[in-house]
């Protein structure tokens, strides 16, 4: 039977698993491996994981591998942490104010937002022609400041002609990749489609670098198998298909984790929790199927139009940055949402960090900057960096520096913040991973002395004129773990209640009371009816306690630490296309594709839509790497009763192609 390789590149670790397909349709795990994700050069982490997993399966040669499947949290983490490359957005038929409600200003610089006349009405009729010279001129003007473009036109899902023409013009003028919104979603709501297209364009570089790294590593190892990528709904597509639509890999890692968790745990119903270094992701499972987000994936405060597992994500994980801020209403001890490099990890490679921590601990008083370092993730100086940004990178060339040393002035600190946003610099500080080290339960390959020193340094910080944050480092570490457990339990409870249609506020006092097992004049008790299925490397450390807070059982399945990589190889290829049919005038039914054909009956229009969609979906399935494709059709019609008669308003035909990956 075929040997499959699953790789999951997360924010903290890159996991790999080799499995063999069984005759009954199941899988047998042959070997697993885990390696730190190397953000500066992704090839290093991927190559180490691949080398380890092949070495642990002595009967398997690289040439025996029939399929490679990749899942990743890089796109999710980029949105959660606000990373991404600068892009231009060309909006036809929209004003900048129209796009504000979707939050476009948070992802596109105002100077890079170009609004032009154009677009269509709800029936696909052109509202105003495009000014092609103005579009080309604007694209050329900002080309040196961006890396890609996104295009949105009014009612492009009813007539994509303007988006297609703008994309042609921009590609010809700049040579840059262009994302059109109608290719990502067939649903109305132009501002949200604009946001989705803009986020897709921002992620092109991130996913392209990952795919190039994986392809290079596989080539050197002698693996010639096709490469697939997990999308946010848990389905698989070819790497080439995913490279054009990286936004669809948002929640790829979590979706693979859910698929892998179900495969490993064999539960019918439950709450799947994937706790990683950067995020905790939770999905409600019913009848062995995760729910799909009806309104699109929501990540990092962005409500996209991407179909994905209905996964709730919070910036909380084993490597969440621990901060002290007594002015914050949730302070003084804060976790996340940003990920930091654990002190124990950075000190293992750079012993000078331990010396710096000893010096800070010997200082007469603690300071807010103590225990915080900057680490360069890449010394590749990109074009567009200013002198201060280059200066910060140069100071970090020899290794990590205390934050005040790497960025000695306020202007330098702002430069460092920009470098963090670009992913070129990371903060190294105390994290829950370090807290586990201090308490004796953390990873054995990290520097426990550095973690202990950092805990002592952090404990000395004063949250008032009289009191230190904690009496000692051990007490500080316990507070961090307690905070992680309480926030994780509260998050799981909110997600479970939302699955039942009950929505509560983040600060709901009854939630806090039930998690504390309050019993006084009132016994406050809420429990989950189904178990927590916890996966991810930190799961065995934290989630038995989290399940206890929620008065439920827990399952940490075998190979839970690489469930994401297992989920990457057990999925199916799934692609779909939709088109809408409307009745612009009585008795005339229009198919909203490029040539806008109109027919005298709904049945004829529907047949024409099916004839047009089927070859496109089959071509998509072939591009996505599907084998033995099966087609499925879905028709949803909306009608209204007018003067006692049922009148057709509009209908949507969706054609779906599914199959196993082509080996």
Image: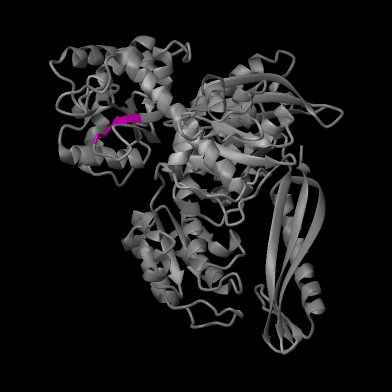
Q: Where, quadrant-wise, is the C terminus in this rendering?
A: top right
Magenta range? 322-326
Count of numbered circles on the image: 0
In the rendered structure, the answer to whether residue 320 lies left or right of residue 635 reads left
- Apparent side of residue 67 relative to residue 440 in the rendered image (left or right): right
> Compared with residue 419, is residue 154 higher up or lower down, i.e. above or below?
below
Place residue 285 in its image quadrant. top right
**Residue 289 at what x, y percent from top left?**
71, 42
Give the residue displayed 53% in from the left and 50% down from the top.
Answer: 503
Residue 20 vs 314, above or below: the answer is above
Q: Looking at the picture, tell me which residue is in the foreground, 156 or 149.
A: 156
Q: Which residue appears at 46% of the width and 64% of the height? A: 170
Where is residue 490 shown, x and y percent of the image? 49, 36
Q: Quadrant of residue 458?
A: top left
Judged by its main secondary structure, the magenta piece is strand
Return the residue found at the far right.
23
Image quarter where the N terminus lies is top right
Which of the 4 image quadrants contains residue 66? Answer: top right
Query: Which residue is found at the position 77% from the left and 77% from the top?
Result: 605
Q: Position of residue 638 (x, y in %)?
A: 70, 74
Residue 157 at x, y = what percent? Answer: 60, 69
Q: Please, which residue is most extreme toward the left here?
A: 364
């Amino acid at each position: 039977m075929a040997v499959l390789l699953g790789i999951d590149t997360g924010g903290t670790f890159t996991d790999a698993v080799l499995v063999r397909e069984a005759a009954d349709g199941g899988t047998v795990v042959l070997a697993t491996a885990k390696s730190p994700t190397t953000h500066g050069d992704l090839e290093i982490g991927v190559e180490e994981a691949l080398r380890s997993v092949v070495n642990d399966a002595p009967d398997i040669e690289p040439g025996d591998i029939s399929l490679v499947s990749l899942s990743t949290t890089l796109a999710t983490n980029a949105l959660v942490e606000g990373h991404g490359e600068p892009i231009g957005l060309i909006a036809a038929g929209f004003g900048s104010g129209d796009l504000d409600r979707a939050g476009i200003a948070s992802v596109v610089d105002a100077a890079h937002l170009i609004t032009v006349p154009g677009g269509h009405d709800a029936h696909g009729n052109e509202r105003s022609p495009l000014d092609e010279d103005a579009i080309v001129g604007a694209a050329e003007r900002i080309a040196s400041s961006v890396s890609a473009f996104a295009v949105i036109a009014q009612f492009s899902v009813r007539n994509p002609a303007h988006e297609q023409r703008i994309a042609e013009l921009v590609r010809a003028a700049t040579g840059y990749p262009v994302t059109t919104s109608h290719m990502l979603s067939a649903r109305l709501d132009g501002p949200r489609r604009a946001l989705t297209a803009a986020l897709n364009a921002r992620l092109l570089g991130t996913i392209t670098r990952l795919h190039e790294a994986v392809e290079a590593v596989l080539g050197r190892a002698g693996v010639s198998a096709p490469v697939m990528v997990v999308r946010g709904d848990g389905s698989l597509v070819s790497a080439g298909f995913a490279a054009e639509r990286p936004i669809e890999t948002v929640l790829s890692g979590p979706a693979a984790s859910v698929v892998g968790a179900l495969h490993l745990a064999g539960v019918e119903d439950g709450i799947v929790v994937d706790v990683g270094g950067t995020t905790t992701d939770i999905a409600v499972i019913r009848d062995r199927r995760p729910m799909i987000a009806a309104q699109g994936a929501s990540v990092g405060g962005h409500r996209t139009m991407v179909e994905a597992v209905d996964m709730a994500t919070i910036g909380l994980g084993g490597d969440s940055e621990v901060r002290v801020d007594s002015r914050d209403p949730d302070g003084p001890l804060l976790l996340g949402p940003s990920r930091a490099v654990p002190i124990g990890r950075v000190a293992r490679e750079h012993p000078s960090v331990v010396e710096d921590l000893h010096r800070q601990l010997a200082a007469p008083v603690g300071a807010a900057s103590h225990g915080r370092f900057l680490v360069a993730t890449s010394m590749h100086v990109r074009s567009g960096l200013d002198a201060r940004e280059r200066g910060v990178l140069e100071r970090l060339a020899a290794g990590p520096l205390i934050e005040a040393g790497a960025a000695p002035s306020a202007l330098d600190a702002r430069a460092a913040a920009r470098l963090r946003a670009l992913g070129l610099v990371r903060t190294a500080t105390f994290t829950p991973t370090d807290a586990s080290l201090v308490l004796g339960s953390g990873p054995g390959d990290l520097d426990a002395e550095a973690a202990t020193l950092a805990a002592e340094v952090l404990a000395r910080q004063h949250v008032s004129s009289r009191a230190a944050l904690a009496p000692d480092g051990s007490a500080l570490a316990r507070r961090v773990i307690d905070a992680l457990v309480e926030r994780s339990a509260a998050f799981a409870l909110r997600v479970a209640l939302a699955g039942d249609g009950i929505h509560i506020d983040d600060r709901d006092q009854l939630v806090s009371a039930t998690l504390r097992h309050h019993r006084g004049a009132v016994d406050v008790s809420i429990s989950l009816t189904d178990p927590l299925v916890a996966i991810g490397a930190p799961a065995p450390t934290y989630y038995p306690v989290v399940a206890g807070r929620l008065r439920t059982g827990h399952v940490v399945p075998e190979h839970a630490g690489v469930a994401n990589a297992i989920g990457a190889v057990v999925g199916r290829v799934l692609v779909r296309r939709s088109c809408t049919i409307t009745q612009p005038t009585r008795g005339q039914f229009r198919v909203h594709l490029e040539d806008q054909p109109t027919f005298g009956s709904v049945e004829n229009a529907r047949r024409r839509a099916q004839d047009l969609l089927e070859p496109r979906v089959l071509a998509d399935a072939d591009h996505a790497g599907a084998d033995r494709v099966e087609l499925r059709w879905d028709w949803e019609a909306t009608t209204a009763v007018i003067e006692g008669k049922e009148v057709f308003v509009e209908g949507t035909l969706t054609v779906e192609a599914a199959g196993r990956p082509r080996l």
